[in-house]
Amino acid sequence: MKVAIIGGGAAGFFSALSVKEHHPEAEVILFEKSQELLSKVRISGGGRCNVTNALSSISAFSKSYPRGAKFLKKAFQIFNNQDSIQWFESRGVPLKVEPDGRMFPISNKSESIVECLMNEAKKLGVQIEMGVSVGNIQPNQEQIEIDFIRGKEKPELFDRVIVASGGSPRRKGLEWLEELGHQIEEPVPSLFTFNMPKEDVVSLMGVSVQDVAVSIQGSKYRSSGPLLITHWGMSGPAILKLSAFAARELALRHYTFKAQISWIGFINQEEVLAELQKKVTAEPTKTCLKAKPFDFPQRFWAYLLHRCNLPENQLWGELGKKKLDKLISVLSNDIYEVQGKTTFKEEFVTCGGLALTEVDANMQSRRVSGLYFAGEILDIDGITGGFNFQAAWTTGYIAGQLKS
């Protein structure tokens, strides 16, 4: 059996290795259009490679995917994060868990993951052809024919083809799928930070606030977690998670909207009032600046007081109802104007791709027999924390079984 793997990223490599594991006699050729393999693996997690996440429940794990949660819940029954951990550790790459659940190689180097995948491919006899760009893919009787744009002169026939070419930022890159009769979900960016050119909060660049709740004004989308203030606006887990779940909504709004922020999480205004009144009663002669009622960085608390037009030397005992109400409003419902987005580091993630209704549980196309898909070309994307790589390992492993 002759098998083509299109794409030399995480999903492509894992597909190729899975084919060799399940079909040792198969001739497996992996085509990569660039001159670099596993490029996203190398740069992810700041060069450490966030391999997966330690979440123990499949149900909780699948909820970390704005698109593809239901589909992956079934796929994780076949290959999940525990399987990924075992796979890498049994091949000499021990992993560690960070407090937030992210998992990295103990070496703290993505090269450990890259070398493991490359060595395994070499050991199992996967052929790798670089600088080969695939053009057309067409069924040809019982086989699949691939035409090449660059790197090879003649078309070739394969018994099975696994496409793991990654997400496409533009629909044009997915049109060949439509030509084969597949339905496409419009690609739009996911996982991005919020630009706030008109807001003075950017003067606090580098300040991080824990347990923040953020929502998109006029929508159902909300998220919580740590928030990082940057020189262009806001980032951090709370913002990135919100950008992923609200990706389509924000694209429709052309990334111009209002973000509502509760700096003390999902606590309601009555609870905030009670907390502030406690402070007024207990420390009436202390200044608002010195006696912080919440665990904020000092610079940030000073900024919030300024935002409420409260002098730093204002005594808690002299805080009238009007000023108290203003402080409560800013703490629990602060509003910022967002105008634009910035890609999160180099980890570009796209929402959209091949509609999941177009593949069966084996990752095989419902339109073309023998054609399989894995990774970001599918309409699957996760939040940060190792979820996108886990989707690559899972879909690659299942596609590589080549089940019909």
Image: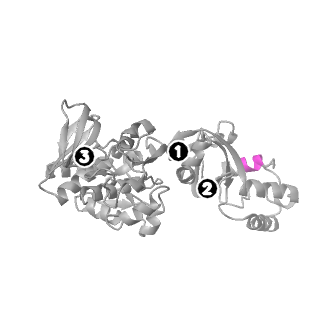
Q: Nearer the viewer, mark 3 or mark 2?
A: 3
Q: Is residue 79 above or below residue 287?
A: below
Report which quarter residue 7 is drawn in.
top left
Q: Nearer the viewer, mark 3 or mark 1?
A: 3
Q: Residues within 10 Å of mark 3 (few under 14, many from 20)?
A: many
Mark 2 to mark 1: distance in Å?
15 Å
Report which quarter residue 292 is drawn in.
bottom right
Q: Residues within 10 Å of mark 2 (few under 14, many from 20)?
A: some
Q: Which residue is mark 3?
A: 5
First in residue order: circle 3 vs circle 1: 3
Q: Can you see residue 386?
A: no
Residue 221, label in figure: 2
Question: The disc labelled 1 sits on which kind of residue?
Answer: Phe
Residue drawn at the location 69% of the way across and 65% of the way down? 267
Q: Position of residue 113 (x, y in %)?
A: 29, 51
Q: Residues within 10 Å of mark 1 (few under 14, many from 20)?
A: many
Q: Would residue 160 appear left or right of 76 to someone viewing this image?
A: left
Report which quarter residue 287 is drawn in.
bottom right
Q: Position of residue 190 (x, y in %)?
A: 50, 46
Q: Would residue 307 appear left or right of 190 to someone viewing this image?
A: right
Q: Which residue is mark 1?
A: 192
Mark 3 to mark 2: distance in Å?
37 Å
Q: Can you see residue 387?
A: yes
Please tell me whether residue 306 belongs to the stretch shown in magenta.
yes
- Looking at the rendering, the stretch of residues picked out in magenta corresponds to 303-307
Q: Position of residue 6 (x, y in %)?
A: 27, 43
Q: Nearer the viewer, residue 389 or 78?
A: 78
